[in-house]
Image: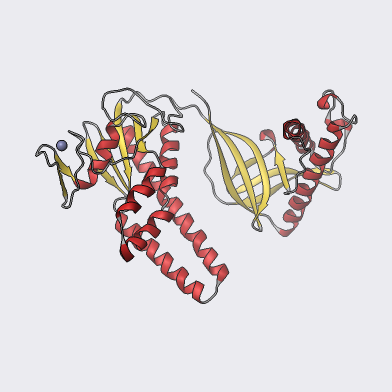
Amino acid sequence: MSELKTTVQVRLYPTPEQAAILRAHCQEYISTVNVLVAALDSDVLPDGGKGTSTKDFTAALPSAVTNQAFRDARSVWKRSCALGVIPLLHKPICQWNNQNWRMEDERLVLPVAQDGKVRQISVGCACVALDGTPGLLRIKRKRGKWMAEVAYTLPEPEHTTGVASMGVDLGIKVPAVVHIIGKGHRFFGNGRQQRAKRRQFYARRKDLQKAKKVRAVRKSQGKEARWMRDTNHQLSHQIVSHAQQQGVGIIRMEQLAGIRQRTARKSRGAKARKNNRMIATWTFHQLATFIAYKAARAGIAVAWVDPAHTSQQCPACFRLNTADDRHYVCADGGWTGHRDAVGAINISRRTGLHGQSAGATVASGSDGGRAA
Ligand SMILES: [Zn+2]
């Protein structure tokens, strides 16, 4: 089983004095890397920098950061051989390796160099709950904001002892329907509420756009994205917890590209356009990614299946039917069930991207099955 690595973005709130220090460090860092890359490429630092230590050059950075700059320079230079040009870093960043920083109680503590001395500063940051082994810390400016990019290696999950197969069907009407073979289906999320909230955001932005309040529009977009992200975190958590409780060994989801296509094709007219706007911006991809990620952490395998006709196909005979009532009734008179659960039922039994039969073992898609 491979380790799970993750990167988390954390907003930083440095004081003006700290911001000045960070800015200086970022500038110094990239110019150090650029100078070192040039030196590695000439005979100033021969043999790709073998035998060179950070004592051999100076930078206005804590030694741990200088070490990191040297490591970076070596990898940039090695890549330059493949690229055929010497790459120059432009965007100011600065990196600290795992032993030199810590995050606690909404503070990021890290060493900085100032006037030839190294000292610790404690920068305010957004609240994040992180577990696992911290790795590289990268600080940079993103759209005028200070951000920390934190790499983590998560503890290896125990592979679950669960064997049941669960299908997850993501949609607009019901955000997620799950079906576990032999244990039935369950709905997650409140589609009506989510749609109302999104309409609210959309209407507000339209007003702001008319009033040419560009900044307010952008702010509202950010707010909506954060709300959506929160919602998806909650949903994915609930779904994976449910899977754990029910002894699920594999979660199957539709191959993502299909979701938008399938739903959009059916609809026409003004109502459809409204619907399509929702679909186009709906963050299925994010929800699916969160589910896959949380499943992997719980030791549950993930497989991506062929999304064709999952909500129309009869789970018993594969005939295609359209349900116009609450109930799905197969035309051959055999199978009936809840209309909104058909998709999840079919997904729970599909194996791999091409197979449609039940009973086969874990089939992992191109980007699925991380924990397998
Ligand atoms: Zn049938």
* Residue in the foreground of this view, choosing between 363 and 3: 363
Residue 257 to residue 217: above or below: above
Horizontal side, residue 52 vs residue 198: left or right: right
Horizontal side, residue 191 vs residue 100: left or right: left
- Direction bottom: furthest residue: 211
Q: How many marks?
A: 0
- Direction right: furthest residue: 44
In percent of the image, x 49 and y 75: which residue is there?
210
Residue 338 to residue 68: above or below: below
Residue 296 location, x and y as percent? 44, 32
Residue 142 location, x and y as percent? 64, 53
Residue 260 location, x and y as percent? 38, 49
The answer to whether residue 254 shows anywhere in this view is yes
Residue 208 to residue 137: above or below: below
The answer to whether residue 247 shows anywhere in this view is no
How are the colours assigned in the image? secondary structure
In which of the image's four quarters is ligand 1 placed? top left
Residue 31 to residue 354: above or below: below
Is the C terminus in the top left, top right, bottom left or bottom right quadrant? top left
* Image quadrant where residue 290 sits: top left
* Image quadrant where residue 151 sits: top right
